[in-house]
Image: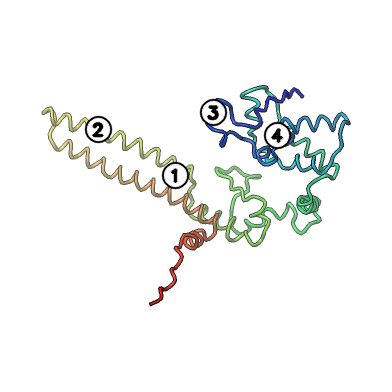
Amino acid sequence: MRCTRCSYCKYIPYDLVKSSRFAYGCPSIKAGKFHSYSAGGKLVTALSLMDGRSEVTDKVVDIAFKCQLCGNCDVACKMCRYDMEPIMALREFRAHLVEMDRVPESYRPIIERTRAAMAGKGPKTPADRNAWAEGLGLKDPSTEAVDVVFYAGCKYSMEESLRETRARAAAQFASSNDVTRATLEEQVAAQEKLVKALRGYARLARLQFDGGRAPYSTVLQAEEQLFPAELDWAAARAQLCASLVGIYKAMGGGWVAAAERLSASPTRPASSP
């Protein structure tokens, strides 16, 4: 370990700091307010444990698991100081503590459920992960080529209460429309190129007419081709935006009603006469 306690891992790059309020980049050191909560501090702590100069205490466990693994320290170290791998070291640090059965108490139920599931002994097993997609007719990317992979995630694919309102709804939306965002973006890009070409054609036709080298029918012909192309371009962009909104809505499950409820202005009490 070559950490020199330069403290770059605690902050954003120094040349970008505009005020002390927004100087911190590491949420762990911001909350813990002690060097051990920074990446450099965790490396020093891990080295001390490796050398047998200290023992694992509840404070050490708190320091290790308070980290969000956001990567700020990793970027700062590589940009401003050395080419170290603090995130890799922090993961190994945590893995070592897990093997020692020294984890925060709030983590224990999660670890127990995960171990039981991976061993096929829990209420949910890895075989249940794809159960949410039964009956949808979706392709299996492990056996055939696909253009787009839909990742439902652990929570949405394993919890039955979320399968219908989240994972299945989003997958059904994409499947029923038979179109993907990538395809729509390609359509929009192609239509935009066509519009640009027709606008150039219309501009040249106008210049030729103004110079007396072409009849006005040439201008009309160019504009007749340009106007429908612009309408198709606008429609393609609207379809792309609508598809994104539909996916967000499917994944959100009733977000419109929630937004209306949250944004509704409170009713004023009736004034007394």
Q: Amino acid at mark 1?
A: Leu
Q: Amino acid at mark 2?
A: Tyr
* Nearer to us: label 2 or label 4: 4
Q: Which mark is residue 117?
A: none
Residue at mark 2: 201
- Residue 137 x, y percent position in the rendering: 58, 55
Q: Answer whether labels 1 and 4 touch (C-beta < 8 Å).
A: no
Q: Residue at x 26, y 32 (%)?
A: 200
The residues bearing labels 3 and 1 have C-alpha atoms spaced at a distance of: 38 Å
The residues bearing labels 3 and 4 have C-alpha atoms spaced at a distance of: 19 Å
Q: Which is more N-terminal, label 4 or label 1?
A: 4
Residue at mark 1: 184
Q: Amino acid at mark 4?
A: Ser
Q: Amino acid at mark 3?
A: Leu
Residue at mark 3: 16
> Looking at the rendering, in which quadrant would you find the C terminus?
bottom left
Residue at mark 4: 38
The residues bearing labels 2 and 1 have C-alpha atoms spaced at a distance of: 26 Å
**Between 273 and 33, the one nearer to me in the picture:** 273
